[in-house]
Image: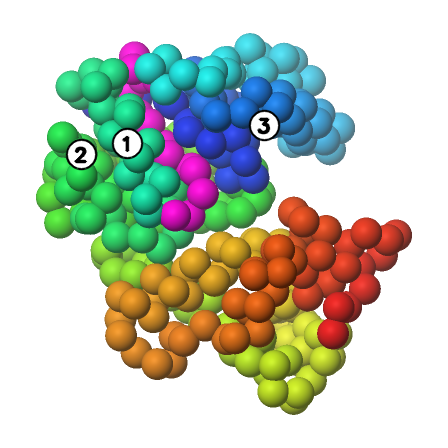
Amino acid sequence: MDVKKVGVIGAGQMGNGIAHVLALAGFNVVLNDISQQALDSALSLIQKNLARQASRGKIEDAEVTATMDRISTTLTLADLGQTDLVIEAATEREAVKQAIFEDLLPHLQPHTILTSNTSSISITRLASRTDRPERFMGFHFMNPVPVMQLVELIRGIATDEDTFQACQAVVEKLGKTAASAEDFPAFIVNRILMPMINEAVYTLYEGVGSVRSIDESMKLGANHPMGPLELADFIGLDTCLAIMNVLHDGLADTKYRPCPLLTKYVEAGWLGRKTQRGFYDYRGETPVPTR
């Protein structure tokens, strides 16, 4: 199947990045969200990021305008009906994703491939709630999408080979690398990454080290580009907690129990960079640890 037009559901941090790389690669993109403000903000950010790429010589100036021209926006899911591929990039809550698919399905063409950018939720279970489990799979981009090279492709139990090959061809056209992952909780990257972040939160919770000492130790002692608590703030603490809950529930192993301190931060609404407070306070000129 030759994918030419792609629908992206969700104009947040992941959705706008996905729309950016798809349009830059020549796909026509329909970006959907329930908020006009979110759509306007996404277009502004995409324009800004494209301009930055042009200023650094990574793309031609003419590509900025051409890329923006390939992106349209809509508040109506029905407008995604004529796309060849849909990538859902809404919040990491299964009930929300299922509701989106339920509303979208009546408008899709029979051949349209339906995918989710979920970072942890069962692809098989999501697919089973649709009319096309054989044309459904996980399409997990890394954050920030324009920078990160990896895309996890996750087959559900019913995903057919043509669907996998079509999605792999899209990844290749984006100039990214696909990793094939089995449909187990959190797949590959987050199965490894999130327990490390959770253990860093436990290290803070138990008083082994401060926020700054934990992050500096991992940056200087393990050569990580970002400390685990800094990275958690970048990802979003609510997303980290959601993934840990999926791991804990799905694998029934106490080693995946979310740290109570992570839960407390989320309950306080301190979700990281997007709320200006998490393990660091971002409201000043430079981030300051909150513990």
Residue, disc 2 = 130
Residue, disc 3 = 38
Quarter of the image with the N terminus is top left
- Which secondary structure type mostly characterizes the magenta part of the structure? loop
How many residues crowd around disc 3 within 10 Å: few (fewer than 14), some, or many (20 or more)? some
Disc nearer the start of the sequence (3/2): 3
33 left or right of 5? Answer: right
How many residues crowd around disc 2 within 10 Å: few (fewer than 14), some, or many (20 or more)? some
Query: How far, Cα to Cα, is label 1 from label 3?
Result: 20 Å
Where is residue 24? Give x, y as percent. 52, 24
Is residue 197 visible from the viewing direction of this image? no
Circle 3: residue type = Ala
Secondary structure of the residue carrying tag 3 is helix
85 left or right of 55? Answer: left
240 left or right of 40? Answer: left
Secondary structure of the residue carrying tag 1 is helix
Residue, disc 1 = 101
Secondary structure of the residue carrying tag 2 is loop
Where is residue 12? Give x, y as percent. 54, 35
* The residue stretch that appears in magenta: 80-93
Circle 2: residue type = Thr
Circle 1: residue type = Phe
Disc nearer the start of the sequence (1/3): 3
Contact flag, marks 2 and 1 (Cβ < 8 Å)? yes
The residue at the far front in this view is: 268
The question of residue 167 being in magenta is answered with no
Report the number of discs.
Answer: 3
